[in-house]
Image (cartoon, rainbow, N blue to C red):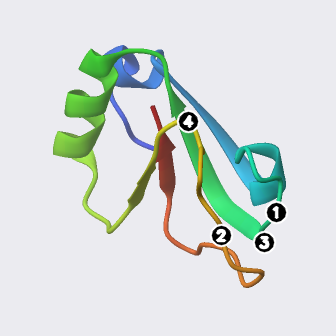
Amino acid sequence: MRGLPASIASQITVRERVSAATVTTMGVGGEIRTLVDLSSIEGVSSLLSELQVKFRILGNGSNLVIGDSGIAEPVLRL
């Protein structure tokens, strides 16, 4: 997430190569290539307006199964 304005960058944490098992309640799944944790709802709207790629959104990870092949697109966790 390079090149983001400081006001947005300060509201996110980016982690690479995260096991889906650590972010879902079922504890299974492949690798999430890029996981972006957002600290505020304002960060969500700002980030989405800046992002020019396809992405996935993850809530609390309840009742979610991610395949062993993982997710290549960035995942935004609210």
Q: Which amino acid does label 1 sit on?
A: Val
Residue identified by numbered label 2: 66
Picture quadrant where residue 42 is located:
top left
Q: In this view, does 60 lie to the left or right of 78?
A: right
Is there CB contact under 8 Å for labels 3 and 1? no
Element at label 3: loop
For marks 1 and 4, the one nearer the N-term is 1
Residue 50's x, y, as percent? Answer: 23, 44
Element at label 4: loop
- Nearer to us in this view, 24 or 39: 24
Q: In this view, does 33 lie to the left or right of 48?
A: right
Q: Residue at x 73, y 53 (%)?
A: 16
Structural distance between the alpha carbons of marks 3 and 1? 7 Å
Element at label 1: loop
Check residue 28 in the rendering and tell me which mark sits there, or answer none: 1
Structural distance between the alpha carbons of marks 1 and 4? 14 Å
Residue 30's x, y, as percent? Answer: 78, 72
Is there CB contact under 8 Å for labels 3 and 2? yes
Q: Which amino acid does label 3 sit on?
A: Gly
Give the foreground label among 3 and 4.
4
Residue 61's x, y, as percent? Answer: 60, 45
Q: Which amino acid does label 4 sit on?
A: Asn
Residue 56's x, y, as percent? Answer: 41, 60
Structural distance between the alpha carbons of marks 3 and 2? 7 Å
For marks 3 and 2, the one nearer the N-term is 3
For marks 2 and 4, the one nearer the N-term is 4
For marks 3 and 4, the one nearer the N-term is 3
Q: What residue type is labelled 2?
A: Ile
Residue identified by numbered label 4: 60
Residue identified by numbered label 3: 30
Is there CB contact under 8 Å for labels 1 and 2? yes
Q: Can residue 44 be seen in this view?
A: yes
